Image (cartoon, rainbow, N blue to C red):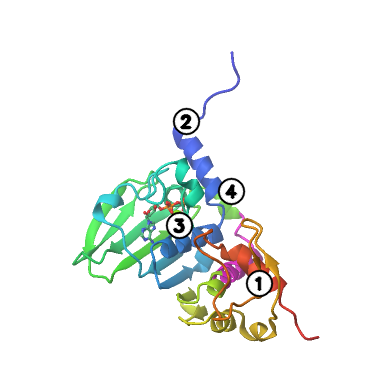
Amino acid sequence: MSRIKELPKSTSHLLSCTQVITSVQSVVKELLENALDSHATSVEIKLENFGLEKIEVKDNGDGIIKDDILFVAKPHCTSKITSHLDLVKIITYGFRGEALAAICAVADLAITTKTADEEFGYTYTFDHNGNILSSEPCPCNQGTSVVVTNLFNNVPVRKQLYRPEKKKKEELRIIEDILVAFGCILTRIRFVLYHNRNLIWQKSVVDRTIDGLRLALGDAADYMEDCEYVDEETQLIGSQVFNEDNTFPFNPLHFPPHPLSVGVKVCSHVTLDQ
Ligand SMILES: Nc1ncnc2c1ncn2[C@@H]1O[C@H](COP(=O)(O)OP(=O)(O)OP(=O)(O)O)[C@@H](O)[C@H]1O
Ligand SMILES: [Mg+2]
């Protein structure tokens, strides 16, 4: 008799979801990317107990239309591509249609959303399989607010990793780094990060990249020099950190610049006076 058994669907689903959502920072990154994909110009992130109790990401983007909400947290459902053929022309951060489904599987999810055409927004709660549990009208502005609570309560091994205070603080620092990286390239977007109602970091809307870099990196931006860079994916060659009009020299039509790599490139060209 074979010793290899097929796992129950519920188990294999949970296991694959813990590969997508591995940490508090991965939840924040996925929700942040969704906000940016929805054309938001303001993204507010609020964490409670380092995100283990609550992660809230609120944007002022397009909102989610009623017909879409049924599929929003279902695996492999996305509005960003229709087949793998679209993979060559992706201009959004997300495309797999699995982030919200994975978050749902390992946490409690609530989404409040309103589009420009709607008079009222709605708050929806979801079960671990991405089905809607409840929906209630809610007066709110255009955009989407995603609230994730009780992260990893059903995955004790993962939750245990966050026992040490050091690990929780490290995670908060990484989340701040992610925001700073996004803030470096997204000048016209406002970012705010709170932890336990304390303001941790914020960046307002600015016109010029250099001003965004100053807000994101502080004095370090003053030490940046012109540089030569080669983008690994597109092999585009640039000659300076800033274009003449002080905008960032990446063309979003070639690829959505990923701040986590762009940030490293920028930082690697920072020269500090010793
Ligand atoms: N903040 C948001 N504003 C508007 N629509 C959203 C928002 N978050 C999610 N959505 C909608 O829900 C869908 C599912 O989101 P999800 O993050 O699970 O997948 P995705 O972004 O398409 O791909 P990926 O899994 O790679 O992130 C999105 O395709 C989008 O249509
Ligand atoms: Mg996404």
Q: CA distance from mark 2 to mark 3?
A: 24 Å
Q: Which residue is mark 1?
A: 266
Q: Which residue is mark 2?
A: 8
Q: Is residue 138 left or right of residue 95?
A: left
Q: Secondary structure at mark 3?
A: loop
Does 28 appear above or below 76?
below
Q: CA distance from mark 1 to mark 2?
A: 46 Å
Q: Earlier in the sequence, mark 3 or mark 1?
A: 3
* Amino acid marked by disc 1: Val
Q: Which residue is mark 3?
A: 150
Q: Quadrant of ligand 2?
A: bottom left
Give residue 150's position: percent from left, percent from top: 45, 57
* Disc 4: CA contacts within 10 A as few (<14), some (14-19) or many (>=20): few
* Amino acid marked by disc 3: Asn
Q: CA distance from mark 4 to mark 2?
A: 20 Å
| Residue 258 visible within the image | yes
Looking at the magenta stretch, what is its main secondary structure? helix
Q: Which residue is mark 4?
A: 157
- Magenta range: 161-181
